[in-house]
């Protein structure tokens, strides 16, 4: 666990708005982009835990891969689908629906310990959950 936390340390840098920072997005994208070619293919996205719907919805240029902007759109899509009332946070049940099944990762991404993750916290927990 310590090794996972150390490699994801940039994810802890969350913007005050609840939006992920550029560093957090780059770190998550780097973990997902296993062949390090700067593009996220569907097999990489699937292994990372992304849904096909999120991938397809976010692939705006229909080129079979996601860049970092499209990657964030896909993460946001998954977050939004688990948050139908649009209140801007996910509780444990909603986060599990969106791919964060580990309480340990949920808790690590919930520094306020209020039982809710905003988009930045979701990205952090989702990235920790990725294989």
Image (cartoon, rainbow, N blue to C red):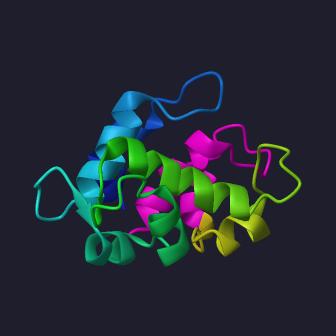
Camera-nearest residue between 127 and 43: 43
- Residue at the extreme top: 16
Residue extent of the magenta highlight:
104-131
Place of residue 54 in the rendered image (x, y in percent of width and height, measured from the top left): 52, 66
Whether residue 102 is situated above or below residue 78 in the rendered picture: below
6 relative position to 91: left or right: left
Q: Residue at x 30, y 43 (%)?
A: 27
Residue 37 magenta: no
Camera-nearest residue between 102 and 78: 78
Q: Residue at x 80, y 45 (%)?
A: 114
Place of residue 99 in the rendered image (x, y in percent of width and height, measured from the top left): 57, 71
Place of residue 39 in the rendered image (x, y in percent of width and height, measured from the top left): 21, 55
Q: Residue at x 62, y 44 (%)?
A: 119
16 relative position to 24: left or right: right
Tell me how many marks there are.
0
- Residue at the extreme right: 85
Whether residue 126 is situated above or below residue 88 in the rendered picture: below
Q: Locate the C terminus and report the quarter of the image it occupies.
A: bottom left
Q: Locate the N terminus and report the quarter of the image it occupies.
A: bottom left
């Amino acid at each position: 666990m310590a090794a996972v936390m150390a490699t994801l340390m940039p994810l802890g840098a969350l913007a005050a708005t609840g939006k992920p920072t550029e560093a957090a997005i780059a770190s998550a994208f780097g973990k997902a982009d296993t062949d390090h070619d700067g593009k996220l293919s569907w097999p990489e996205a699937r292994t990372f835990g992304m849904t096909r719907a999120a991938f397809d919805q976010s692939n705006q240029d229909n080129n079979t891969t996601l860049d970092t902007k499209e990657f964030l759109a896909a993460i946001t899509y998954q977050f939004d689908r688990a948050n139908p009332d649009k209140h801007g946070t996910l509780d444990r049940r909603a986060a599990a629906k969106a791919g964060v099944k580990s309480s340990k990762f949920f808790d690590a991404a919930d520094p306020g310990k209020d039982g809710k993750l905003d988009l930045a916290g979701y990205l952090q927990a989702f990235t920790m959950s990725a294989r």
